[in-house]
């Protein structure tokens, strides 16, 4: 499974500090809910942007001794399965086209917006009115504003979408779903 943790570090700072080595296990396993059951497993690498650069970062993984599910802990400046960082996506989706990084990643951001629009019907079924009452004919633009208004930023919105609704802005992924306990 994937868990997303709040951090004030930029991707660059996380990268320079090898911050993955300091990432603590969540107190409770996000899969089975058992407390203090996660032990260090390993790391995997992925890419994330910082302004107009691309960094390779390492992501901490843990293994639950109780349910045997592995849990990766993604810093919330990064999005699940998307290389462009949360702040740049937020700036792009909010129309801050004067920012160099928004211009630089413009083509990716357009693809991301299309994914968001495509996922919207499913996303809205999952979240209902959790981020405020939905209009009769919700639009991606309208829901985006609602989400930011409620959560403050995309990083916070993604934490809530993943942990509470097991989805994110761009799709519903297996890594955010709970698994059945293996018994016997
Ligand atoms: Zn567990």
Image (spheres, rainbow, N blue to C red):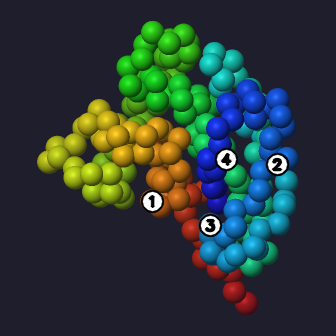
Q: Name the residue under label 4.
A: 74
Quadrant assignment, res 149: top left
Image position of 142 (left or right of 147) = left
Distance from the alpha carbon under mark 1 to that under mark 3:
12 Å
Q: Name the residue under label 1.
A: 165
**Whether residue 72 is situated above or below residue 92 in the rendered picture:** below
- Mark 1 Cβ and ligand 1 under 8 Å apart: no
Image position of 8 (left or right of 139) = right
**Numbered label attached to residue 30:** 3
- Quadrant where the image shows the C terminus: bottom right
First in residue order: circle 4 vs circle 2: 2
**Numbered label attached to residue 81:** none
First in residue order: circle 2 vs circle 3: 2
Image position of 138 (left or right of 8) = left
The image shows residue 44 at horizontal and vertical percentages of 79, 45
- Look at the numbered disc 3 and give the secondary structure of its residue: loop
Distance from the alpha carbon under mark 4 to that under mark 2:
13 Å
Instruction: In the displayed orientation, state which residue is furthest to the bottom.
Output: 184
Residue at figure coordinates x 22%, y 50% from the top left: 134
Residue at figure coordinates x 39%, y 31% from the top left: 114
The image shows residue 103 at horizontal and vertical percentages of 50, 11
Q: Name the residue under label 2.
A: 22
- Mark 3 Cβ and ligand 1 under 8 Å apart: yes
**Whether residue 118 is situated above or below residue 85 in the rendered picture:** below
Residue 182 visible to an observer of this rendering: yes
First in residue order: circle 1 vs circle 3: 3
Distance from the alpha carbon under mark 1 to that under mark 2:
27 Å
């Amino acid at each position: 499974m994937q868990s997303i943790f709040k951090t004030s570090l930029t991707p660059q700072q996380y990268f320079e500090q090898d911050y993955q080595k300091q990432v603590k296990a969540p107190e409770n396993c996000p899969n089975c809910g058992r407390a203090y059951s996660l032990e260090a497993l390993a790391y995997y690498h992925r890419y994330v942007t910082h302004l107009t650069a691309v960094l390779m970062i390492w992501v901490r993984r843990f293994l639950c001794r109780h349910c045997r599910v592995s849990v990766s802990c993604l810093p919330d400046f990064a999005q699940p399965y998307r290389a462009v960082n949360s702040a740049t996506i937020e700036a792009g989706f909010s129309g801050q086209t004067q920012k160099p990084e928004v211009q630089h990643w413009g083509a990716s951001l357009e693809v991301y917006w299309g994914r968001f629009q495509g996922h919207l019907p499913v996303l809205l079924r999952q979240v209902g009115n959790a981020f405020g009452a939905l209009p009769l004919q919700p639009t991606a633009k309208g829901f985006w504003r609602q989400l930011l208004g409620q959560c403050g930023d995309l990083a916070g919105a993604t934490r809530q979408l993943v942990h509470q609704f097991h989805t994110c802005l761009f799709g519903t992924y297996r890594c955010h779903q709970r698994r059945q306990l293996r018994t016997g």
